[in-house]
C-alpha cells in the first residue's frame, strides 16, 4: 500500500501524466460520439472541456471516470489503465456526473459518510473528511436535510462534496454550473478555483466565459474531435480574430442630424475600417449616441485606434462618455473553431469527389 | 468484503427509508393474519387431518401474497438506479460489479426474511394460548421456513435479473411476475398429470412449490428442491451480473 503510494508519487515526479488519453473512440450504434481523441493533463492543471451540446464531452468524461468502456484507445489515470486497473484508477477520481444523481431518501451527511466509506476512506477518518467536504462546499447547515428536499444549487454542492470527499488527485466535473442561478454559479466557480490548488481538474461546459474564468487550458471539442487546444489567450491569437475586436465610443450629440454627421466623420478616419451607430445606443434625443467602430486591419495589428479617436474628439470638441476596446470573447473564437472544422471536412470531400471524377 | 457490507447496508437502509417496505409489511401481515385466522377456525369445526402450519402455508391467501411479493420487492433494485442515474456515481466509485450484484441480492433477501419473520409469532401465540403445538413436529417449522427462504432466494434472484434489464420499474415488475408465474404454473402440471405418468410428475414436482410446501410443512425433507433452488439462484445471479455489465458495455 505504502510502497504503491511511493511509486505513484515517484512516477508523477518523473512526469507521468495525471490523465493521458490516446486514440479514444466511442460509437453509439452508428453515431460516432468520440473519434480518435488524444490529450493529456498534467498535475495541477485545470482543463476546460468546451463544446456545443452533443459534442462528446459527457461521453469522454464517462469513459475517463471508468463508467463507460471505450471502443478503442487507451485511458490512463495517474498511470493506471482505466480498464485493467480500474479500481486503482477509479479511487483516484472524484466524478460529478451531469445533473448530479443522488439518493433522495438519504440525508446529506449520511450520504457523504456512505460515499466516503465506499471510496475506501478509513472508518476513523470518515467523520473528519465528511466535515471537511461539508465545510468546503458550504453545505454544513443542511447536513440533516433529506437530499430529495434540497434545491438544485444545494444538490450540485452535495455532488461536489461527494466528488472530493476522499481527496482524489483528479476531479472530473461534468457541467458543474448547469441549471444554477448567477449567484450560485459564482459560488461554484470560486469553489472550483479554490480546489485547483490541491487537485487536477477537468471540467466541461458549454458556457465559454466560465471556462475562460476558471481554466488554465481549454480543449475545444466538436463532433467527437478536438478542434483546438491552448490557453484562452493562445486560442484568441490563433483564431485570427483581431485582439481588439471592436471599439465602443459614446459621444454627446444634440440631435439625429448631429449623430449622423459624427458618423460620417468617423467613417472618413484613416485608422477606421467601419463605424456604425450601435443598435443598443441610447437614442440621439437623450443627447448621447453610441458608436461601434471596427478598426482598419492595419491598425489592429499595429495597435489600438483609441488614441486617434481621442485626438479626433478633442480636435472637434466632442464630449466623450465612453471609449473602450472590446476583446474578442472566447465565444467568437469558439464559433470560428467549431464552424471551421465541418467546412474543412466538406472541402476535403469535395476535392476527393473531384479526383474521383 | 468491507465494500460489500457497506453496499448491503445501504440497500437495506434504503428499503426502510422509503415507505415501500412498511406498506408491503402492512399488507402482507394483513393477508397472512387473516390466513392464520382461517386456518385456526377450521379447528372449530371438528377434527382435521392437517395441522395449523400445514394449512397456513397451503392456502390461496398464502400463495397469492407470496407471488405478489417478488415483483414489488425487486423492481426498483436496478431500474431505479438506471433511471435516476445514481448508477453512475455508484459504478465510478472503486467497487466491483460482483459486489454490487451480490449486495443488492443480499439486501433484498434480508428484507424478504424480515417481512416473514412476524408470521412466526402467530405460532408462538397459538402455543401460548392453547398449549398445543401447531405442527406435527419441530421439523415442520424448520422445513416450512427453510423452503420459504429457498423459494425466496430463487424468485428474488429472478427479480434481480429482470430489474437489471430495464430502467422502467413497471416493466421489471411485469417481467418478474410473468416469469415467476410461468415457473409456478408449470408446477401445477403435476396435478393435471395425476398419478398416471410418474416421469412427468417427477419432473414437475421440481417446479411445484405447492407440492414441495405440502411436503416440507409436514416436516418431510426432500433434497431435490434444495439443490434446484440453490442452483437456480446461482444461475440467475450470474446472468444478472452479465446483464448488468453488458448494459454499460453495449451503451
Image (cartoon, coloured by chain):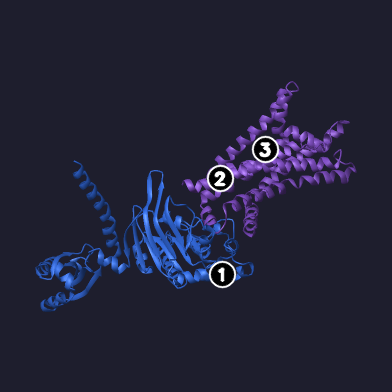
Chain colours: A blue, B purple
Task: Pick whichever, B176 or A216, lies toward us.
Answer: A216
Q: Bin the neighbour count of mark 1 within 10 Å (Cα to Cα): few under 14, some 14-19, many 20 and up.
A: few
**Contact, mark 1 vs mark 3 (Cβ under 8 Å):** no
Query: Splitting the image into 4 quarters, where does residue A17 fall?
Result: bottom left
Q: Nearer the viewer, residue B208 or A357?
A: A357
- Residue A3, numbered circle: 1
Picture disc at residue A16: none
Residue A65 visible? The answer is yes
Residue B69, visible in the rendered structure: no
Numbered badge on residue B67:
3
Q: Chain of mark 2?
A: B
Q: Please tell me whether mark 1 or mark 2 is closer to you in this view.
A: 1
Residue found 70% across the figure and 29% down from its top: B203
Q: Tell me, yes or no, whether dots 1 and 3 are on the same chain.
A: no
Where disc 2 sits, the SS reads: helix
Total labels: the figure holds: 3
Tell me the element at label 3.
helix
Mark 1 lies on a secondary structure that is helix
Give me the residue at 71% from left, 23% from top: B193
Q: Earlier in the sequence, mark 3 or mark 2?
A: 3
Answer few, some or many: residues within 10 Å of disc 2's Cα (few below 14, many 20 plus, some between 14 and 19).
some
Chain label for disc 3: B
Q: CA distance from mark 3 to mark 2?
A: 26 Å
Amino acid at each position: 500500500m505504502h510502497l504503491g503510494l511511493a511509486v505513484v508519487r515517484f512516477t508523477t515526479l518523473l512526469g507521468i501524466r495525471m490523465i493521458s488519453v490516446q486514440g479514444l473512440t466511442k460509437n453509439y450504434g452508428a453515431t460516432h460520439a468520440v473519434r480518435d481523441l488524444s490529450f493529456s493533463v498534467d498535475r495541477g492543471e485545470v482543463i476546460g472541456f468546451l463544446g456545443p451540446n452533443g459534442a462528446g464531452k459527457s461521453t469522454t468524461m464517462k469513459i475517463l471516470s471508468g463508467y463507460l468502456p471505450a471502443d478503442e484507445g487507451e485511458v490512463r489515470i495517474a498511470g493506471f489503465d482505466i480498464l485493467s486497473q480500474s479500481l486503482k484508477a477509479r479511487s483516484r477520481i472524484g466524478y460529478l456526473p451531469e445533473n448530479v444523481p443522488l439518493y433522495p431518501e438519504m440525508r446529506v451527511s449520511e450520504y457523504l459518510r456512505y460515499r466516503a466509506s465506499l471510496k475506501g476512506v478509513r472508518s476513523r477518518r470518515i467523520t473528519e473528511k465528511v466535515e471537511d467536504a461539508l465545510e468546503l462546499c458550504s453545505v454544513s447547515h443542511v447536513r440533516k436535510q433529506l437530499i430529495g428536499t434540497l434545491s438544485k444549487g444545494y444538490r450540485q454542492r452535495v455532488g461536489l462534496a461527494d466528488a472530493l470527499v476522499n481527496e482524489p488527485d483528479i476531479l472530473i466535473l461534468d457541467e458543474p454550473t448547469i441549471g444554477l442561478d448567477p449567484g450560485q454559479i459564482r459560488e461554484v466557480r470560486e469553489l472550483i478555483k479554490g480546489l485547483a490548488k490541491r487537485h487536477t481538474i477537468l471540467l466541461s461546459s458549454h458556457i465559454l466565459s466560465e471556462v475562460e474564468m476558471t481554466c488554465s487550458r481549454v480543449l475545444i471539442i466538436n463532433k467527437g474531435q478536438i478542434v483546438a487546444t491552448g490557453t484562452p489567450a493562445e486560442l484568441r491569437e490563433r483564431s485570427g480574430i483581431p485582439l481588439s475586436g471592436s471599439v465602443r465610443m459614446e459621444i454627446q450629440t444634440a440631435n439625429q442630424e448631429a449623430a449622423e454627421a459624427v458618423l460620417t466623420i468617423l467613417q472618413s478616419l484613416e485608422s477606421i475600417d467601419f463605424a456604425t451607430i450601435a443598435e443598443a445606443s441610447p437614442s440621439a434625443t437623450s443627447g448621447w449616441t453610441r458608436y461601434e467602430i471596427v478598426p482598419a486591419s492595419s491598425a489592429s495589428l499595429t495597435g489600438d485606434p483609441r488614441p486617434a479617436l481621442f485626438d479626433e474628439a478633442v480636435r472637434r470638441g466632442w464630449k466623450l462618455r465612453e471609449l473602450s476596446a472590446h476583446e474578442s470573447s472566447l465565444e467568437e473564437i469558439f464559433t470560428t473553431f467549431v464552424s471551421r472544422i465541418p467546412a474543412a471536412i466538406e472541402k476535403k470531400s469535395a476535392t476527393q469527389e473531384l479526383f474521383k471524377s | 468484503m468491507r465494500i460489500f457490507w457497506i453496499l448491503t447496508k445501504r440497500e437495506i437502509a434504503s428499503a426502510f427509508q422509503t415507505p415501500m417496505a412498511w406498506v408491503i409489511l402492512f399488507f402482507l401481515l394483513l393477508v397472512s393474519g387473516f390466513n392464520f385466522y382461517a386456518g385456526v377456525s377450521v379447528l372449530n369445526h371438528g377434527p382435521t387431518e392437517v395441522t395449523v402450519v400445514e394449512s397456513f402455508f397451503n392456502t390461496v391467501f398464502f400463495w397469492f401474497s407470496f407471488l405478489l411479493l417478488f415483483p414489488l420487492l425487486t423492481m426498483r433494485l436496478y431500474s431505479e438506479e438506471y433511471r435516476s442515474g445514481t448508477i453512475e456515481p455508484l459504478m465510478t466509485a472503486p467497487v466491483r460489479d460482483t459486489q454490487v450484484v451480490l449486495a443488492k441480492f443480499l439486501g433484498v433477501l434480508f428484507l424478504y426474511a424480515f417481512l416473514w419473520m412476524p408470521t412466526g409469532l402467530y405460532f408462538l401465540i397459538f402455543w401460548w394460548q392453547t398449549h398445543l403445538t401447531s405442527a406435527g413436529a419441530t421439523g415442520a417449522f424448520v422445513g416450512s421456513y427453510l423452503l420459504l427462504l429457498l423459494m425466496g432466494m430463487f424468485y428474488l434472484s429472478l427479480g434481480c435479473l429482470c430489474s437489471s434489464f430495464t430502467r422502467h420499474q413497471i416493466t421489471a415488475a411485469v417481467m418478474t411476475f410473468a416469469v415467476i408465474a410461468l415457473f409456478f404454473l408449470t408446477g401445477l402440471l403435476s396435478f393435471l398429470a395425476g398419478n398416471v405418468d410418474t416421469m412427468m410428475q417427477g419432473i414437475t414436482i421440481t417446479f411445484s412449490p405447492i407440492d414441495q410446501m405440502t411436503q416440507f410443512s409436514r416436516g418431510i425433507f426432500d433434497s431435490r428442491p434444495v439443490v434446484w433452488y440453490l442452483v437456480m439462484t446461482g444461475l440467475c445471479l450470474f446472468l444478472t451480473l452479465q446483464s448488468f455489465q453488458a448494459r454499460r458495455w453495449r451503451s
